[in-house]
Amino acid sequence: MLMLIRHYDGRREDALLLSIAGNAMRVALPDREDCMELRLCEGQWVSDANQPVEIEFIAATAEDEWARFVDAMVALDEIIAAMSTVETAAAVA
């Protein structure tokens, strides 16, 4: 599911929800190699940098939202491919 993360400093990032378990969720961001973990602490979501964030889930129904979702999926595929390349190189070395 596509979501929007609003950081305390005003930044906004599109993200793709990967999993939710208890009070934590893992999301993929198009410009990061690693996933981000968000935690719910005392009613406030916080980033892996321990900063408060607000989250908004986006229904991919409109054409432009669908395009953003596809772009996020392509970025996720690129992240997975890059991680696989690194793991393969490490295994060979």
Image (spheres, rainbow, N blue to C red):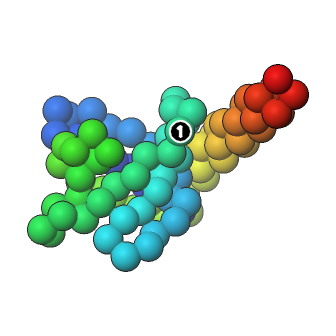
Q: Nearer the viewer, residue 85 or 56?
A: 85
**Residue 40 appears at what percent x and percent y?**
24, 65
Q: Looking at the image, which residue is at 65% across and 43% down? A: 76
**Residue 22 appears at what percent x and percent y?**
37, 76
Residue closest to the far front: 93
- Report whether 25 appears left or right of 55: right
Residue 25 figure quarter: bottom left
Q: Residues within 10 Å of mark 1 (few under 14, many from 20)?
A: few
Q: Looking at the image, which residue is at 27% across and 33% down? A: 11
**Residue 80 appears at what percent x and percent y?**
71, 41
Q: Looking at the image, which residue is at 77% across and 29% down? A: 90
**Which residue has dot 1 on it?**
34
Say above or below: 68 vs 27.
above
Q: Nearer the viewer, residue 20 or 91?
A: 91
For the C terminus, the image quarter is top right
How many tags in the picture? 1
Residue 2 visible in the displayed image: no
Say above or below: 19 vs 33.
below
Q: Looking at the image, which residue is at 29% across and 60% down? A: 39
Q: Nearer the viewer, residue 77 or 22?
A: 22
Residue 37 visible in the displayed image: yes
- Report whether 71 appears left or right of 77: left
Q: What amino acid does circle 1 point to?
A: Asp
Residue closest to the far left: 42
Q: Secondary structure at mark 1?
A: loop
Residue closest to the far right: 92
**Residue 31 appears at what percent x and percent y?**
52, 30
Q: Nearer the viewer, residue 39 or 3?
A: 39
